[in-house]
Amino acid sequence: MKLTIERAALLKSLGHVQSVVERRNTIPILSNVKVTARDGRLSLNATDMDLDIAESVAAEVATPGETTAPAHTLYEIVRKLPEGSQVELETADGDSLTLRSGRSRFTLSCLPTEDFPVMAGGDLPQEFKLPAAELRGLVDRTRFAISTEETRYYLNGIYLHASQRDGVDVLRAVATDGHRLASVEMPLPEGATGMPGVIVPRKTVAELRKLIDETGEDIAIALSETKIRFSFDDAVLTSKLIDGTFPDYERVIPSDNNKIMEVDCKQFAEAVDRVSAISTEKSRAVKLAVGGGHLVLSANSPDNGTASEELEVAYAADAIEIGFNSRYLLDITQQIEGDAAQFVMSDSASPTIVREVGDASALYVLMPMRV
């Protein structure tokens, strides 16, 4: 194998595939990226057995061939080469890959391509397309609520499924960690009718998010009950799905909350951020006291003292005091793109609904805390 490629193009593709590779691997071949050169293209492939990414990029291929090389080492070498440089990759035998650029020369140990695992795509019967901006919105507005608690593994991803709202078919993404819940929906795309509900793992969501930023095109999605594939311009991301049952999240969305507060989202977020500087690192508690047209945000800690700030709000119900984790409040307000946020409350112990005024596509549920 022998090829020449521009550093920036190689770095971009290597950056995508090497991040799938785990730093610590008990299986040596999983530390490597598969490098294939043919028909004027360089193809790179990496996997951790649960997630597989393949990306191709134009290159001057003098001699076709393939090998596998240490992913992180190869990436670090290319990253440190001068901008605008040309990179030549060559294998004389199957045991080593030589990289030349300017006066630099590196020789990397290789492993046989026959040992590189192939992640069978299998039959993925459900196929549809989503605009990049729509998929980015589904991911960005829900992924902050994904649980990191490994014991409840079925919460370690985004639940993607077909549903209905007011008789209209929608594609809905939901994530929850038990303290907060994010639900975002869009009109059901053509081809997604009858799709199984699937849980896309947290790591897959993170890798998918990086790739979305690189494209402005529609993204082709194919899935079954066990796997999902996202196809971009030059990249294909295939992942196993979480084998578990996502809880009936609609049961935790309150339907009889009747205390409605509307507040300027930016002012509210900034006030929460300021007041929470006092709250303890452990609880991050902030109290909201609402009555008339005023909201008083306050926090106190035995070590740091007290803080309070008053905001004008639209509120016509009985006065209420309720406490929240300030970080959770900020995570949610960051997802609201409009000017005003609406808090729909019941009492100090019941879940609160947060949504953007005028946007029914996203809904957030936040559990209160004692303060």
Image (cartoon, rainbow, N blue to C red):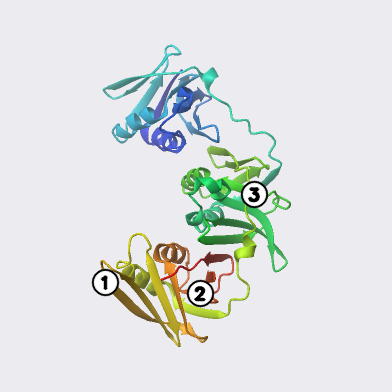
Amino acid type of disc 2? Phe
In the image, 295 versus 191, the foreground residue is 295
Q: Which residue carries the number 1 mark?
A: 305
Secondary structure at numbered mark 2: strand
- In whole angstroms, how far apart are the C-alphas of marks 1 and 2? 28 Å
Q: CA distance from mark 1 to mark 3?
A: 45 Å
CA neighbours of label 3 inside 10 A, class few (<14), some (14 to 19), many (20+): few
Q: Who is closer to the viewer here, 277 or 112?
A: 277
Residue pictured at 58% horizontal, 57% vertical: 174
Q: Which residue, as the protein is rendered here, is positioned at the far top?
A: 93
Say which residue label 2 marks: 343
The three-letter code of the residue at mark 1 reads: Gly
Say which quarter of the image contains residue 228: top right
Q: Nearer the viewer, residue 47 or 216?
A: 47
User: In front of the other: label 1 or label 2?
Assistant: 1
205 w.r.t. 108: above or below: below
At mark 3, the secondary structure is loop
Front label number (2 vs 3): 3
Q: Which label is found at residue 245?
A: 3
Q: Is residue 136 above or below residue 329?
A: above
Looking at the image, is mark 2 or mark 3 earlier in the sequence? 3
Q: Say left or right for 83 vs 25.
A: left
- The quarter of the image holding the C terminus is bottom left
Residue 281 relative to residue 317: left or right: left
Q: Nearer the viewer, mark 1 or mark 3?
A: 1
* Earlier residue among tags 1 and 2: 1
Percent of width and height locating residue 181: 54, 61
Question: In x, y percent, where is residue 309?
Answer: 33, 78
Residue type, label 3: Thr
Q: Position of residue 26 (x, y in %)?
A: 46, 26
- Residue drawn at (64%, 49%), measured in percent from left and top? 245
Mark with earlier residue (1, 3): 3
